DNA sequence: GATTATGTTGACTAACATACTCAGGTATCG
DNA sequence: CGATACCTGAGTATGTTAGTCAACATAATC
C-alpha cells in the first residue's frame, strides 16, 4: 500500500513551487529543498510539465513555475498520473478497471471498494492549496 | 497503492477455509476455488500456518483448516503480515516507523497520516467473519 | 558572438520485488 | 509398503524502482 518515492518527490516539488509562487525556481534550488537528487528531479519535473502542472523557462535565469493555481491542482490526480490508479485492486478501479474471473462471487471486492473510496475521497478532495495552507 | 497478488490470494484462501469451517480442505481443492496455482498456494498456506492462522494435517486425508475462529482473524493483521505496513509512507507508519529528514516541516505528512488512518481503521475493523457474512 | 547557465532528451543500469516453478523430502493412512 | 498429502529450499523470468550519465538545445549576458 506504499506510495513510490517518485510520487512523494513530485508532491514535494509542487509544494516548493507553490510556496514560492510567482517566482521562478531552478532545479538545483528545488533539489536542495526537497532532498531529491538533481538528475532524478529533472525527470520528474519534466513529467509534471508534460502533464500541465508546471511551466519552464530555458537558459540563463531559467527554471520552473506552477502552471496552475494551487487550488486547481488536485493531489489525487497528480498521484494517479504518476503511479496509476488509487484502487488497491483492478476489479474496483474506476479509472482503469480490470475484470477478474472470481468477480461474481468474490467476497473481497466490497472491502477493496471501501478502501478505494476512502483513499480516493481523501486525495480527490485535497488540493495543493490545502497542503500549503495546512488545511486538511 | 496496490495490494499484491500474494495478499489477495491469502485472503481468498482464508475465505474458502472459513466457508468450509470444521472440514479439512486440500491444497488442490483450495486452488480450484481460488484460482491460485497449486505450487504458489502451498507457499502461501504454509506462511499462513506459521503465522498461526491455519493448522494442517499431513499424509492421506490431510489438508488445511482454520486455526482460529473467523471473528478472531483481523484482515488488517493478515495484510500487514504478508505485505508489511498499511501506511503509505514510513514516516506515518505505527507498526514500522521510519524517520525522514524533512519530517519537521513536511506538509505531506498530515495527508499521509489521514490515508493511513482511514485504511487501518477499515482493515482493522474487518474480520474474516465479516467478509464471510457479507457484513461490512 | 562566445560564454555560461539553465532546461531537455534518451539511453542506460544496479538493485530489488513479484509471481511464480520445480525437485525433492517427510509424515500419515490404509 | 505405497499412495496421498503437506513441507522445504532453491531457482527463475519478468517487471519496477530509483536512480545515473552523456550529450544537446536554448536563452541571457558580457
Image (cartoon, coloured by chain):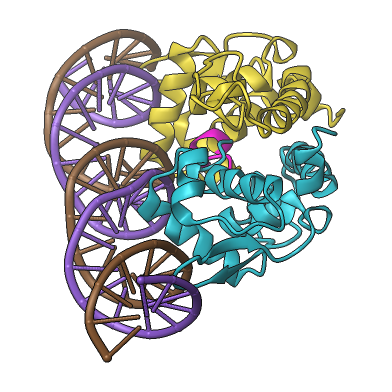
Chain colours: A cyan, B yellow, C brown, D purple
Q: Percent position (x, y) of residue B88?
A: 60, 32
> In the displayed structure, would residue B111 be above or below residue B51?
below
The answer to if B5 sits in the magenta stretch is yes
Q: Nearer the viewer, residue C24 or D13?
A: D13
Which residue sits at x=43%, y=59%?
A: A42
Residue range corresponding to the magenta coloring: B2-8
Q: Nearer the viewer, residue D13 or B59?
A: D13
Which residue sits at x=53%, y=16%?
A: B97
Q: Percent position (x, y) of residue B122?
A: 78, 26
The quadrant where residue D11 appears: top left
> For this view, does A91 lie left or right of residue B47?
right
The answer to if A18 sits in the magenta stretch is no
The quadrant where residue A136 appears: top right
The quadrant where residue A121 appears: top right
* Residue B2 appears in the figure: yes
> In the displayed structure, would residue C23 be above or below residue A65?
above
Amino acid at each position: 500500500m506504499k506510495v513510490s518515492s517518485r510520487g512523494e518527490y513530485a508532491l514535494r516539488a509542487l509544494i516548493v513551487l507553490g510556496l514560492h509562487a510567482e517566482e521562478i525556481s531552478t532545479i538545483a534550488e528545488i533539489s536542495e529543498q526537497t532532498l531529491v537528487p538533481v538528475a532524478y528531479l529533472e525527470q520528474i519535473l519534466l513529467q509534471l510539465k508534460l502533464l500541465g502542472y508546471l511551466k519552464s523557462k530555458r537558459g540563463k535565469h531559467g527554471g520552473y513555475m506552477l502552471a496552475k493555481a494551487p487550488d486547481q491542482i488536485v493531489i489525487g490526480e497528480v498521484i494517479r498520473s504518476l503511479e496509476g490508479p488509487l484502487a488497491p485492486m483492478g476489479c474496483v478501479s474506476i479509472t482503469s478497471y480490470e475484470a477478474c474471473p472470481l468477480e461474481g462471487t468474490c467476497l473481497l471486492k466490497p472491502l477493496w471498494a471501501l478502501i478505494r473510496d476512502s483513499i480516493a475521497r481523501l486525495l480527490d478532495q485535497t488540493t495543493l492549496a490545502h497542503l500549503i495552507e495546512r488545511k486538511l
